[in-house]
């Protein structure tokens, strides 16, 4: 089970903003679980490479088993060649970030998408550098980064920033998820739920109100 913290200011209470973030995260996790179950074709509780390929094909993010294998390798932390739910949630989070930068939604990052991403990370300020990076990581030569290539680049950026103690090491990609998670079939009215918990009506939820 994944736990997460949304209380930015450690006041012992949740502000409305923090509460909304918690609701959004719960929605995203519920959606990731549903996606996981729908692609776990043999119902063994894990996503293997064939099941992952089906999902990536549906999303237009891979064409070959080799690409699916690349993706699996990045998220398969325990090395059992399949993704359990915790590993899958990390993949789903990365997918959401990838979609955010794939602004024309064609399933790849073109040079402009990549330039925008690298600027956000304060890595490339000039276009020539973006082109060089694209050439280096865009191995299949279509002038774009496929999802698996983007993951490889992301991994190297994370390692490099850690190694060099660069100031933008705080600008980890997950921090850039500003978009709302995919809508659920049943919508939750955050205002209504918040008011229900905030029994004394002081616009924050303290630990007693959570009990
Ligand atoms: Ca399975
Ligand atoms: Ca695994
Ligand atoms: Ca694109």
Image (cartoon, grey):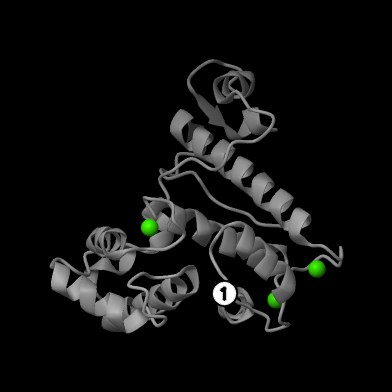
User: Can residue 48 be seen in the rendering of this structure?
Assistant: no
Residue lying farthest to the right in this orientation? 43
Q: Nearer the viewer, residue 165 or 64?
A: 64
Image location (x, y in percent) of residue 117:
30, 61
**Viewer-closest of 180 and 38:** 38
The N terminus: image quadrant: bottom right
User: Is residue 158 rendered to the left or right of residue 24?
Assistant: left
Q: Is residue 29 left or right of residue 42?
A: left
Q: Measuring 82% from the left and 62% from the top, which residue is drawn there?
A: 41
Q: Of all residues shown, which one is farthest toward the top?
A: 201
How far across and down, in percent of the image, does residue 176 sit? Answer: 38, 54
The image shows residue 62, relative to residue 78, as above or below, that is above
| Residue at point 60%, 35% (across, down) | 207
Q: Is mark 1 within 8 Å of ligand 2?
A: no
Q: Is residue 8 left or right of residue 65?
A: left
Decide which of 101, 94 is in the foreground and name it. Answer: 101
> Which of the 4 image quarters holds residue 128?
bottom left
Point out the image quarter for the C terminus: top right
Residue 49 at x, y = what percent?
70, 75
Residue 57: image location, x then y, percent = 62, 63
Q: Residue at x 69, y 29 (%)?
A: 186
Give the residue at mark 1.
71
- How many numbered tags mark residues here? 1
Q: Is residue 176 above or below residue 56?
A: above
Residue 83 visible to the viewer: yes
- Mark 1 burial class by Cα count in 10 Å: few <14, some 14-19, many 20+: many
Quadrant for ligand 1 reads: bottom right
């Amino acid at each position: 089970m994944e736990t997460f913290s949304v209380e930015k200011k450690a006041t012992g209470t949740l502000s409305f903003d923090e509460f909304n973030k918690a609701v959004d995260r719960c929605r995203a996790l519920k959606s990731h679980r549903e996606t996981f179950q729908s692609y776990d074709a043999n119902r063994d509780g894990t996503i293997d490479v064939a099941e992952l390929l089906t999902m990536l094909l549906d999303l237009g993010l891979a064409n070959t088993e080799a690409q699916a294998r690349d993706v699996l390798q990045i998220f398969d932390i325990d090395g059992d060649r399949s993704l359990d739910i915790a590993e899958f949630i990390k993949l789903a989070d990365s997918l959401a970030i990838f979609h955010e930068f794939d602004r024309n939604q064609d399933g790849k990052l073109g040079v402009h998408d990549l330039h925008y991403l690298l600027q956000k990370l304060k890595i490339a300020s000039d276009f020539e550098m973006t082109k060089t990076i694209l050439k280096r990581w865009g191995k299949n030569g279509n002038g774009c980064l496929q999802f698996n290539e983007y993951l490889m680049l992301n991994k190297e950026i994370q390692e490099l920033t850690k190694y060099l103690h660069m100031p933008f090491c705080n600008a980890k990609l997950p921090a850039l998820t500003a978009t709302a998670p995919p809508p659920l079939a049943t919508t939750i009215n955050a205002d209504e739920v918040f008011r229900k918990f905030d029994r004394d009506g002081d616009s924050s939820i303290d630990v007693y109100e959570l009990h």
